[in-house]
Image (tube, rainbow, N blue to C red):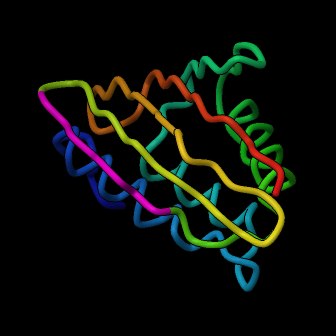
Amino acid sequence: MEDLSSRSAQEVLDDHLNIAQNWGAEEDIERVVEEDMRRNVSEDIVVLINRGVFRGHEGVMQLAQMLGEELPEHNAFEYTFRAAEGKIAMLEWAYEDTTVRVRDGVDSYLIEDGKIVAQTIHYTLEQK
């Protein structure tokens, strides 16, 4: 098994984002999220979002399913800004399909030992 623990925050962020781009309609979202969790997400992760606090891989899967329902066409995300320094990383992103758009997506990450241990998520879902 590949040792991923010595990766930098930038390497973890890049891997996480590359895997996330595979969530399109032709891919099984659960399989994509499981691969991301195996490679990039701590089993003890804590995710803060305006809907509450989500913990562990189960919480990550719940959030992925919610996002999949809110962004129904599963188009690719547009990553408008990304940065990583030391143990932290930040991503700005957008999304658009025929029914909804997100213009202000922002995620922040705390990365330790090659895994995301904490994340914050903010976005505004706009109906078209």
Question: Where is residue 56 drawn, in percent x and y?
Answer: 65, 26
* 89 w.r.t. 98: above or below: above
Residue for point 78% across, 19% down: 51
Q: Quadrant of the C terminus?
A: bottom right
Q: Is residue 51 left or right of residue 91?
A: right
Q: Residue at x 41, y 33 (%)?
A: 116
For this orientation, the residue located farthest to the front is 128
* Residue 80 vertical placement versus 29 (above, below): above
Could you tell me which residue is drawn at 82 percent across and 43 percent down? 66
Q: Position of residue 43 (x, y in %)?
A: 56, 30
User: Depth check: 40 or 86 in front?
Assistant: 86
Q: Where does the image place residue 48, in percent across and percent down from the top left? A: 61, 17
Question: Magenta region, mostly helix, strand or loop?
Answer: strand
Inspect the magenta stretch and tell me whether residue 10 lies in it. no
71 vs 87, nearest the viewer: 71
Q: In which quadrant of the rendered image does the N terminus lie?
A: bottom left
The residue under the point 46% across, 21% down is: 118
